[in-house]
Amino acid sequence: MLSLLLSHWPLNRRLLIGLLPILLLWFFVALHPGGDSEELRFLLIALATSATLLALAVLQSPEAFLVALPVRRNDLVRATYVAGLLAALLGLALPLAARWAVTGGSLPAGVLGNLALILVAEILALLVFLPLRFRLGPHGLTVFAGLLLAGLVALHLGPGVYAGIETVTETATRALAHPARTVPAALAAMALLGLLSSHLACAAFARRSF
């Protein structure tokens, strides 16, 4: 498992080095003081950084090469889940650490809660996407994008996109107001979803031929 996780560095290092100037620019914009949108800028940059690293971790598809090695397919699937989770966490931790250092350890109220919501959204996307990727290969991304688009259309035809986002945000805010009750339940639910998603991905990948 560890060797599979470490393989993401040689696979992605050139892309990461190429993205470094963009990431530094994002951090400069996010940490630039002043303005009414300062917190919103920071959250958007944190989302962009985390989503970028997450995409790099899970969109690379060297399975056709790796399955020819003495590697179990289930280990390959599970390593991708772990790599995606670590990439999402790192993408949120980097701008958070930079902001912490610049502001002298001062973080406005609500920032950590919003970052937690971003992480939950990215994990849910990961749990839906990876079974599609391991079953359909490169076409899994197309199907996933179609599902996202269908969800946005349904939301638009229903309560509306902004109303739906506000409802989710308000529900999450109320939940975070009582973390002792809601966080354990949320973690348990995410763990169950992760196990189900991983099982589906392993079963799908076992039927793939190269």
Image (spheres, rainbow, N blue to C red):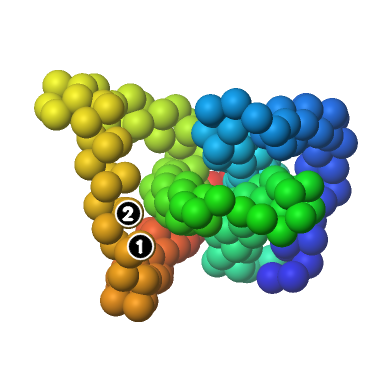
Local SS, label 1: helix
x then y, percent, for residue 210 = 59, 44
Let me know if residue 109 appears in the view. Answer: yes
x then y, percent, for residue 85 = 58, 58
Local SS, label 2: helix
Residue 117 vertical position relative to residue 150 in the rendered view, above or below: below
Disc 2, disc 1: CB below 8 Å?
Answer: yes
Q: Is residue 138 left or right of residue 3?
A: left
Q: Residue at x 33, y 25 (%)?
A: 149
Q: From the viewer's side, name the closer residue of 13 and 139.
A: 13
Residue marked by disc 2: 173
Q: Residue at x 27, y 47 (%)?
A: 170
Say which amino acid is labelled 1.
Leu
Say which amino acid is labelled 2.
Thr
Q: Residue at x 31, y 45 (%)?
A: 169
Badge 1: residue crowd in 10 Å (few <14, some 14–19, many ≥20): some
Q: Is residue 104 left or right of residue 17?
A: left
Q: Is residue 75 left or right of residue 183?
A: right
Q: Residue furthest left?
A: 158
Residue marked by disc 1: 176
Residue 175 vertical position relative to residue 25 in the rendered view, above or below: below
